[in-house]
Amino acid sequence: MSQAATQAPQTAAADSPLKVSLERDGRLLKLTLARPKANIVDAAMIGALLQALDQHLKEPRLRGVLLTAEGPHFSFGASVDEHMPDSCAQMLKSLHALVLKLVESPVPVLVAVRGQCLGGGLEVVAACNLIFAAPNAQLGQPEIKLAVFAPAASCLLPERIGQAQAEDLLFSGRSVSAEEAHLMGLVSVIAEDPDQAALDYFDKHLAPVSASTLRYAVRAARQDKASRIRAKISFVEKLYLEEMMKTHDSVEGLTAFIEKRQPTWQDR
């Protein structure tokens, strides 16, 4: 039977920001961010990703997830409007629920990145197992420039690339190229077609193995890391909501971004 005959078509409700399909004869769950060019990780996108993962991760034949995006960019990040004080608590809790769902996924999560992958978009990506990036990919956590910090990335990046390199990205807010991200260990593979590279990896290494044994291997490899990230996310979420968001500068930075003006810092 041909591959085309064994793939379910990608589907999405008319108002859904996500396309969902089961491919490779039900062995691979493909999730495609479908609001180009920005593919903002807002409440709707987070909810759609959580729903798809909740629905499919327990399927016994599943051996992997491929997360990708339509358009020239993976994601410009989270919704700044949803970061404002009256809505940031719910936004942060739902984003962290998604990050933990990915970190604790029972099967490997592969992700294909093109173009910009910033802020909340990179936090989602960093929670996955293997990152396949196009040469034009730019990855960064620019939150500090808005006078906030990146909570999930503060937990995820030190685990992936070490404390010093994580602090560089988190404190500077700079973006790095696919090549630099690869040298850091953040990006696993650079490929002109990262989607195809991820599929090739899946076909060669994941599709042939026992799905049940693969789940035990994932649990064994990630147990300590998942526990550390879950504990630290609880701490940084409280730090973000109960302390930082009560400062003048954090609210000013977000407001200035929305109003398209330069912020005025009071350093408090």
Image (cartoon, grey):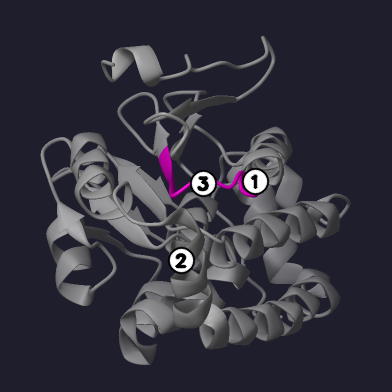
Q: Are marks 3 and 2 in contact (CB under 8 Å)?
A: no
Q: Which numbered marker is on residue 213?
A: 2
Task: Give the Cα distance between marks 3 and 2.
Answer: 35 Å
With respect to residue 133, does 253 lie above or below? below
Q: Residue sitting at 34 percent across and 87 percent down?
A: 162
Report if residue 106 lies within the magenta region: no
Q: Quadrant of the N terminus?
A: top left
Q: Is residue 233 left or right of residue 108?
A: right
Q: Secondary structure at mark 3?
A: loop
Residue nearest the observer in this picture, 236 or 173: 236
Circle nearer the viewer, 3 or 2:
2
Q: Which mark sits nearer the N-terminus, 3 or 2?
A: 3
224 vs 266, left or right, is left
Asked whether disc 3 touches disc 1, contact meaning CB atoms under 8 Å apart, the reply is: no
Q: Residue furthest right?
A: 86
Which amino acid lies under the numbered mark 1 shown in the image of this protein?
Val
Q: Residue at x 80, y 80 (%)?
A: 243
Q: Position of residue 58 (x, y in %)?
A: 65, 49
Q: Is residue 192 visible?
A: yes
> Which residues, given as a range, are shown in magenta?
57-67
Q: Residue at x 69, y 49 (%)?
A: 255
Say which quarter of the image contains residue 240: bottom right
Q: Secondary structure at mark 2?
A: helix
Distance from disc 3 to disc 1, alpha carbons, whole Å, reads: 9 Å
Say which residue label 3 marks. 77
Label 1 or label 2, whichever lies nearer to me, is: 2
Which residue position is annotated with label 1?
Answer: 80
Give the residue at x 25% y 51%: 132
